[in-house]
Image (cartoon, rainbow, N blue to C red):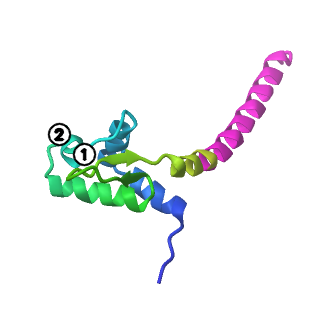
Amino acid sequence: MVTVDQLSTVFAALADPTRRAILARLAEGDATVNQLAEPFPISLQAVSKHLKVLEQAGLITRGRDAQWRPCRLAPAPLRDVTEWVETYRRFWEARYDRLDDYLQELQQTPKEK
């Protein structure tokens, strides 16, 4: 049995543009499945499958308000993604700084004839 870590589950959920659009909509406020499905040319069942993936990744929660089950953004897993990406951002910044230093050094060196 393969064990998948939480960060991999979150990245897999974020890999789909429809799920990212759903998260963007939920960043504006809670919404029902019908409200979330409006902009997409897909069935409610397909939207529900996307919501299930987002819920399993911990990116959304579903409440209960009478017969409605509004979806809500749960941004905590995005913090783990940000921390992971930040590590590599610092790596690339260090590389660019070294390249910048090297290019400045080349510009200051007198040209050979």
Could you tell me the amino acid type at mark 1?
A: Thr
Q: Is residue 54 above or below residue 31?
A: below
Residue 39 appears at what percent x and percent y? 19, 37
Give me the residue at 45% from left, 57% from top.
58
Does residue 47 sit above or below 30 in this rendering? below
Identify which residue, 12 or 60, lies in the foreground: 60
- Judged from the image, the secondary structure of the residue bearing numbered disc 1 is loop
For the C terminus, the quadrant is: top right
Could you tell me if residue 113 is visible in this image? no
Q: Quadrant of residue 101?
A: top right
Does the magenta run of residues contain 88? Answer: yes
Instruction: Say the numbered circle drawn on residue 107.
Output: none
- Report if residue 56 is visible in the image: yes
User: Cα distance, mark 2 to mark 1?
Assistant: 10 Å
> For the magenta stretch, what is the residue range?
84-113
Residue 85 % position (x, y): 60, 46
Q: Are marks 2 and 1 in contact (CB under 8 Å)?
A: no
Magenta portion: prevailing SS class: helix
Q: Amino acid at mark 2?
A: Glu
Q: Residue drawn 79% across and 29% down? A: 102
Q: Which residue is mark 1?
A: 32
Residue on which disc 2 sits: 38
